[in-house]
Amino acid sequence: ADAKCRLIYISSTGVYGSAEGDWVDEETPPQPAREGGKASLAAEQVLRSHPLGSRGIVLRLAGIYGPGRIPRAADLQAGRPIDAPAEGWLNLIHVADAARIVLLAAEQSTVPNLYCVSDGSPAQRGDYYRELARLLSAPDPQFVTPDPNSPASLRAGSDKRVRPAKLVRELAPPLLFPSYSEGLAAIVHG
């Protein structure tokens, strides 16, 4: 087998659950609350215990956005309210940067390994949607409290900030979009 062969699993920062606004990184114990986070953590554990796990790299990706993938843009343009609180942290990574990081990880010599993947610039939900509305020339966003059992409510409850310090230190990815501001502007005006 090729010694350089890597098995890269794209996981999710959803494995952390809520951190009540605190920072999380690779050393933070996972405590997923939602089914997607639980499934991602279970898959990570399967990889670690598998014989190919010694070649594995787990990338815990933050929320991916990019062309054709801007949640709630149509709602903002139509003036519909966002069913989430304006407060709470969003952690994001532009799809182009995520793809570049996967390629960098494939070249990584230290395996097995784990990285938190985000742009490192968490945004308050309200700030993100206000900036998106501005770029779309849409009305200012209105926020409503979602049903406590809805998927939107569960997503909004994962209030954390993802610190990609290990990723930056070890892979040094040159981000095309270091924050949502640059990324959204490129998508809307690109």
Image (cartoon, rainbow, N blue to C red):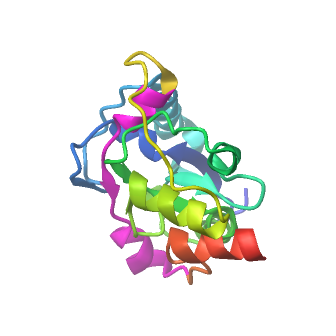
Give the vertical position of 142 relative to 95 (above or below): above
Based on the picture, tell me whether residue 42 belongs to the magenta stretch. no
Q: Is residue 57 visible?
A: no
Residue 186: in sight, yes or no?
Answer: yes
Q: Nearer the viewer, residue 132 or 41?
A: 132
Foreground residue among 24 and 67: 67
| Residue at image point 41% right, 54% down | 126
Which quadrant holds the N terminus?
A: bottom right
Q: Nearer the viewer, residue 87 or 173?
A: 87
Left or right, residue 30 beside residue 170: left
Q: Is residue 116 above or below residue 168?
A: above
Q: Residue at x 70, y 76 (%)?
A: 186
Magenta stretch: give its range.
152-173
Residue 166 highlighted magenta (yes or no): yes
Q: Does residue 181 lie above or below 55 as drawn?
A: below
Residue at image location 59% in from the left, 44% down from the top: 52
- Looking at this view, is 182 or 11 the one in front? 182
